[in-house]
Image: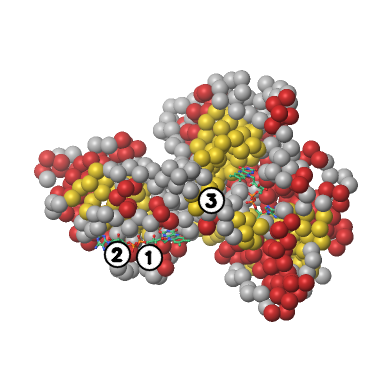
Amino acid sequence: MSTEQNNEQMPDWSQYRGVLVFVEQRSGTAKKVSWQLLGAGKKLADKLEVPLMAFVIGDQVDHLADEAIYYGADRVFLCQGPELQDYRTRPYSRITLKLIEEHKPEICLFGATGTGRDLAGAIATHLPTGLTADTTELDVEPHPSRLLLASRPAFSEKMMATILCKQYRPQMATARAGVFQALPRDPERKGEIVLIANPTEGEQIATEVVNFIEQTGTVNLEEAEIIVSGGRGLGGIEPFRLLKELADELGGQVGASRACVDAGWIAHEHQVGQTGYTVRPKLYFAIGISGAVQHTVGMAGSDVIIAINKDENAPIFQFAHYGIVGDLFQIVPAITAEVKKRKAAKEDPTMAFKV
Amino acid sequence: MLHIVVCIKQVPDSREIRIDPVTNTLIRQGVPSIVNFYDLHGLEEALRIKDELGACVTVVTMGPPPAEKSLKECISLGADRAVLVTDRKFAGADTLATSYVLAKTLEKVAEEFGAIDMVFCGKQTLDGDTGQVGPGIACRLDLEQLTYVGKVIHVDPEKRRVRVERKLEDGIEVVETSFPVLITALKELNKVRRAPMPGMIRAARFKPTVWTTNDFPDIEISKIGLKGSPTIVSKTWVPEVRKVNGEKIAGVAPEQIAEQLMEKLWGSELAQKLGWA
Ligand SMILES: Cc1cc2nc3c(=O)[nH]c(=O)nc-3n(C[C@H](O)[C@H](O)[C@@H](O)COP(=O)(O)OP(=O)(O)OC[C@H]3O[C@@H](n4cnc5c(N)ncnc54)[C@H](O)[C@@H]3O)c2cc1C
Ligand SMILES: Cc1cc2nc3c(=O)[nH]c(=O)nc-3n(C[C@H](O)[C@H](O)[C@H](O)COP(=O)(O)OP(=O)(O)OC[C@H]3O[C@@H](n4cnc5c(N)ncnc54)[C@H](O)[C@@H]3O)c2cc1C
């Protein structure tokens, strides 16, 4: 099999150039992952010396085309119409296909969200081409191979695999939210906006979005930049308030170990770990959590980890950048107070000298 | 009567897979094979519709011969019919090749057992974990596609419409569409029943319909198995669970600890990334 493949001629893909990113939005607000993907896409595009492109589909979303440019796109395709207000597989995939067929990007990236996966799965089958799911690392080999090196966790995060798509173009991938870094927004940045006619105008579409019930204030650990997690050491529901205070002060969200979820102190959607969410925030607090492997697989990829535990031998300290040995009931309020103090000092710099 | 097809995959229970600390490879030995649990929620929903409105439920899987065991489990729960699509030539399939064979299978199921109104798939599997096979099948068979369904609100067999709740990261979308439709199931969809005794007895004697490439005269060999798979796994590795063994802050009063900690954080790269500095 492998020798056969080696003898196979690589098809001529010279018509396929550029990196294309899907800008996902709801009611005119873009998902953060879209800008993160532009950040990831920019690196690939620079390495390949090609433009970074984005596409926006929706109703009254002109402003998002501008935003895409501010976040790094050189060219944005924009398709609008009242029929396109809500995401629906058929119309969205028709537009995306047409775009890909006409503009021939070599790489297409989508967020690994409900919508992104739904759309990418349909497109890849139509084209057809390979689609790597849920990637957490993206790189590219330079010219002439120009291969996308798309890496993703597998087997409940226990293994990583790099996946290639040699014989088809474009090379497609969905990418996880919160993993890649967006470029700083630059409102001075210039780019080109290309309008695409809405092909579904006045068309009968079988699927109808009846309602959308936004769940604001609910947890979304996968997108959180800061997570303050608590474990059995909290001892009950009430102490979670201390964590909530710290999380609110930092603009973060509250997570938990399974022990707390099992005890009924907090809902499962807060659970981090093998049977909960895998998170990669910029800052993770593990408070009163021992550091069982089922927990650490879900959070060890965080940029900075702070552990607070009264047992200096708790395994969680092996994963922590900063380990605090002590009683969480004393330490957590002290940290919250310190954060408040620093925030106040930032707003009023003279404060820094007063305290 | 409604005809509902449920696609199931037999998978190693990846929650049980361990890493060999010496060789850094996956230990698959002794890992039980199970029906991908999202697929069981798809089956349960099909069975509920059957209980309520009357329906014929066909379960299909593409996999090696031992996957028969998983089909029997579905029969014991109440499925009417089961099809195993198996052939060495199917091996090594990625999602594109898998959805091709499953689409061919559903066409044949429709031909032999009657037109299909609804298809259930799982949200994703425990092993490949891509969630791409459902959309792939829907696309190939031109079915309406409703992914990430957490609740089936209403099935109207006369109007041939279904209304569901899709659970997305930012909320719940209530959406309606027409048959034929493909739905991918979340675990919130329902609670999976236990197999009743008569079901278990039926399953014990049950033999699934088995199809190989010979049963698909017009199948394109270039589109199946490893050859028909555009994605190639080029490298795998076990990510090191990063042990940083960072610095300890201990001993002094809580206020001092908090101050020390924040001093370090404020001076770090993190503060810039978070826009604190
Ligand atoms: C480490 C690793 C990484 C991989 N990464 C990719 C990748 O990025 N892209 C890619 O295209 N392939 C990938 N594959 C291959 C792919 O996972 C499977 O081999 C493919 O056959 C099914 O995809 P899935 O398990 O992800 O199914 P999913 O798309 O997650 O399955 C969704 C649903 O489809 C149905 N279904 C899936 N398979 C079957 C079946 N055989 N029979 C009946 N119903 C089924 C079930 O209802 C299931 O719940 C990878 C494989 C491995 C081992
Ligand atoms: C199949 C399987 C899947 C699992 N999935 C998950 C998962 O997804 N996520 C998960 O988290 N777990 C999971 N677990 C459970 C996991 O094995 C551990 O049991 C769990 O993580 C322990 O939670 P904990 O650290 O909060 O509790 P414990 O292990 O009891 O640790 C409590 C810690 O709090 C400290 N402490 C107590 N009082 C104080 C105080 N006043 N101040 C400071 N520190 C204090 C103690 O020193 C101790 O280290 C799973 C287990 C299995 C078998």
Whether residue A224 is visible: no
Mark 1 and ligand 2: say if the CB distance to the nearest ligand atom is below 8 Å: yes
- Secondary structure of the residue carrying tag 3 is strand
- Kindly identify which chain the residue marked by label 2 belongs to: A
Whether residue B210 is visible: yes
Q: Quadrant of residue B241?
A: top left
Residue shown at the point (30%, 68%) measured from the top left: A235
Residue farthest to the front, as pictured: B22
Residue shown at the point (49%, 25%) measured from the top left: A190
Q: How many marks?
A: 3
- Secondary structure of the residue carrying tag 1 is helix
Name the foreground residue: A275 vs B162.
A275
Mark 2 residue type: Leu
Q: Is residue A308 left or right of residue A215?
A: left
Report, in whole angstroms, how far the alpha carbon at label 2 lies from the one at label 1: 8 Å
Residue shown at the point (72%, 67%) measured from the top left: B72
Q: Quadrant of residue B93?
A: top right
Residue A155 position, x and y percent, is 55, 50
- Secondary structure of the residue carrying tag 2 is helix
Report, in whole angstroms, how far the alpha carbon at label 2 lies from the one at label 3: 35 Å
| Quarter of the image that includes the C terminus of chain A | top left
Residue shown at the point (70%, 63%) measured from the top left: B69
Question: Can you identify the residue that label 1 sits on?
Answer: A260
Mark 3 Cα-neighbour bin, 10 Å: few <14, some 14–19, many ≥20: some
Q: Quadrant of ligand 2?
A: bottom left
Mark 2 and ligand 2: say if the CB distance to the nearest ligand atom is below 8 Å: yes
Q: Give the number of the mark in front: 3 or 1.
A: 3
Report, in whole angstroms, how far the alpha carbon at label 3 lies from the one at label 1: 30 Å
Looking at the rendered structure, whether the residues under marks 3 and 1 are on a common chain is answered as no
- Kindly identify which chain the residue marked by label 3 belongs to: B
Mark 1 residue type: Cys
Mark 3 residue type: Ile
